[in-house]
Amino acid sequence: MSSYVSYYRHSGKVHPSYIVFFILGIIITAVLSIFYSIAMYYSPSAYLNIIITVVYSFLASKLAWKITKWGKARNMIVWAISIVAYFIVFTYVHFAAYAAVVFRDEVRVIDFSLFLDFLWEPSYLLMAFKDIIVPQGVWTFSSNGPTVSGFFLLAIWLVEHLVALCSPFYFGHTDMERPFFEETGNWGKETICALRLPHQPEENFPQIKKAAERNDIDYFNSLKVPRRSGYCQISYYTDPAEELGTRYLTLTNVKDTVDRRGKASTNIHDIIRNLPVSPAFIAALESSPPEQDVRIS
């Protein structure tokens, strides 16, 4: 029966307004890139630079999702291409602004006139990095340390920009799996149930999927009381404009583990993602027998 069950998949459609929001995203990315360049140059610590990169990457991830959400782009390819476009803008504007900070001369913080020169003349910008910034370097790891330059500097920049490129894909992938309700034009609203089902071994996943696809509430009621080391989280998406319609169910296995060194970690594994079910089935899941009802404190 599971072969006939249709899990949620994006329609692939893109609202015409997306182009406006995409341009807005380009502008915001360019502005953030300028501030990023200034912060990276004047940062007193290499460790602070790492934090700045992480913060920028997080903001870029949220921006890419917000633009996709506002423009109602239900298309993973369009989302991915947009992220790459934002990254190209970030990289070019960042290098132009960075060079304008390095060669600011008597100007405080950044020479915007020089920034525009670098921005509109790529060959001029390339020469500045190839002949001066990369060979000589502009910063050190410590006050008495050697200037970071050459291939080592390029390697650091490569890692930095890979983080900026990959983070939106990593942080935004879950957001992009959010269902879109075509009938009302709304992105789904997530609800995480207070009820936690028992943590399930991986060999039980196929049976759990079949039970959910059949709306077999008796199977879920038969599960044993969960151990405290792990649980199965129930969440679902609803249409904010029509909360009595279809729910898209997700079951997530969550387990806390501690390795030999005493380091704690959490393993998360989706058993089911975005299975269309009825409101009655969700209500039945949430009203399991009291002895099995383990709720979040």
Image: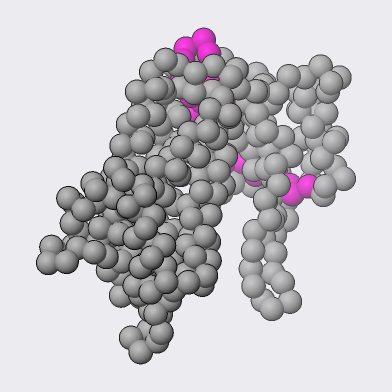
Answer above or below: position of 23 versus 185: below
Q: Residue furthest top?
A: 183
Q: Nearer the viewer, residue 118 or 131?
A: 131
Residue at the spot x=17%, y=50% of the render?
Answer: 113
Residue 62 visible in the displayed image: no
Q: Position of residue 160 (x, y in %)?
A: 48, 60
Q: Nearer the viewer, residue 219 or 63?
A: 63
Q: Main secondary structure of the magenta part?
A: strand
Colour style of the rendered protein structure = one colour
Residue at the spot x=47%, y=12% of the render?
Answer: 184
Residue at the spot x=67%, y=76% of the render?
Answer: 262
Residue at the spot x=18%, y=51% of the render?
Answer: 112
Quarter of the figure that contains the N terminus: top right
Q: Residue furthest bottom?
A: 144
Asked if residue 272 is among those painted magenta in the image, a careful observer would answer no
Range drawn in magenta: 179-200
Q: Nearer the viewer, residue 50 or 111?
A: 111
Q: Position of residue 98 (x, y in %)?
A: 31, 59
Answer above or below: position of 281 versus 295: above
Q: Position of residue 134 (x, y in %)?
A: 42, 68
Asked if residue 185 is among those painted magenta in the image, a careful observer would answer yes
Answer above or below: position of 148 versus 102: below
Q: Position of residue 225 (x, y in %)?
A: 74, 48
Give left or right: position of 57 versus 278.
left
